[in-house]
Amino acid sequence: MTADPADDTRTRILRAALDLFAEHGYQRTSLRQIGERLRLTKTAILYHFPAKEHLLAALVEPLLADLETLLDAAQTQPTEQARWTVLEGWVDVILAHRRPLGMLYHDIALVGRGDTYHRLMEVAMRANDLIAGPNAGRRERVLAVQAVGACSDPVVFFTDVPDEVLRADMLDGARRLLAPHPADTAAGPPARSAAGSRTDAAAAPHSDAAGPHTDAAAGPDADAAAGPDADATLGSATPATPAGAASGAASRRRRPGRPPALGREQVEAARRMHAAGTHSVDAIAAALGVSRATVYRHLTAP
């Protein structure tokens, strides 16, 4: 069975548009250039795509359709299962459409306020709602939006990182972002001064939106419960520490640079890469940003 000539021409136009948008950008690519690459007239291009934005919408369509299918499947699941079905599936869909997404990242908004734009907004809102869960408060909704960003944006900015490594990194970041933090329960109710104002009023106005590490009311104990990332997150809101204690803490503090351990997805990726024989331990360590000793520790762990 042979392909329909009309369908074949349409596919060729889309492929040429994808290549030219990658080379020159959407704005600087004309329909005439697309036609010249295919030895077609501009009129022939317009027969299949009445305007250039229709080309862009057609290139985005497979991505949108896959995301909609994913959300439909997650919609009937329990809250926690739905959350991770969306996040893991979202990463897989984004990686599957990595090339057009990266190229069109700044051009999708140019589709205009038509059906494609509204579908894109609806997909984003549905994903945020499923990740946040029912009856979510402001903080949970903010974290949901951040989680979707953590599972999308790195694909655009880390174009040289292999899919498997990037997938592990993105999901590890989402898990860290959404994990319950000890300080949330250890801190207790916010302390109040005699005047009735919260003692954390001196904290930066944006600290509440920054995530679970920024509650100044948690006091010094929250810093110990928060783990090694707390110092960098709290910033100037961290309570003052006596000079002697600061010196001792500084000597124990891990130097900045490579992370001390790998997340679950990163461990699985490292083991798959090692088992496949396609990467040396040095290459795995470089790809994941850790030391060789860390890789060996996780490869040999039961």
Image: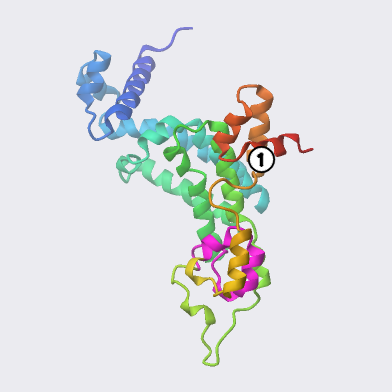
x and y percentages locating residue 213 in the rendered image: 57, 64
Relative depth, front residue between 214 and 55: 214
In the depicted structure, whether residue 109 falls above or below residue 59: below
- Amino acid of disc 1: Thr
Quadrant for residue 102, please give it.
top left
Q: Which residues are magenta?
A: 208-234
Please identify the quarter of the rendering in which residue 302 is found: top right
Say which of 158 and 289 sits in front: 289
Q: Is residue 32 above or below residue 107?
A: above
| Relative image position of residue 284 (x, y in whole percent) | 60, 32
Horizontal and vertical percent for residue 32? 20, 23
Q: Is residue 299 magenta?
A: no
Query: Which residue: 62% across, 26% down?
Result: 280
Query: Count the marks: how many?
Result: 1
For the residue carrying disc 1, how many other residues have a C-alpha within 10 Å: few (<14), some (14-19), or many (20+)?
A: some
For this orientation, the residue located farthest to the top is 1
**Identity of the residue drawn at 57% across and 49% down:** 174
Q: Position of residue 190 (x, y in %)?
A: 59, 79
Identify the residue position indicated by label 1 in the image.
294
Left or right of residue 18, residue 164 in this image: right
Q: Is residue 71 among the parts visible in the rendering?
A: no
Please state which of residues 94 and 31 is positioned toward the viewer in this rendering.
94
Q: Is residue 214 one of those drawn in magenta?
A: yes
Q: In this view of the protein, which residue sits in the foreground, 121 or 2?
A: 121
Label 1: state its secondary structure: helix
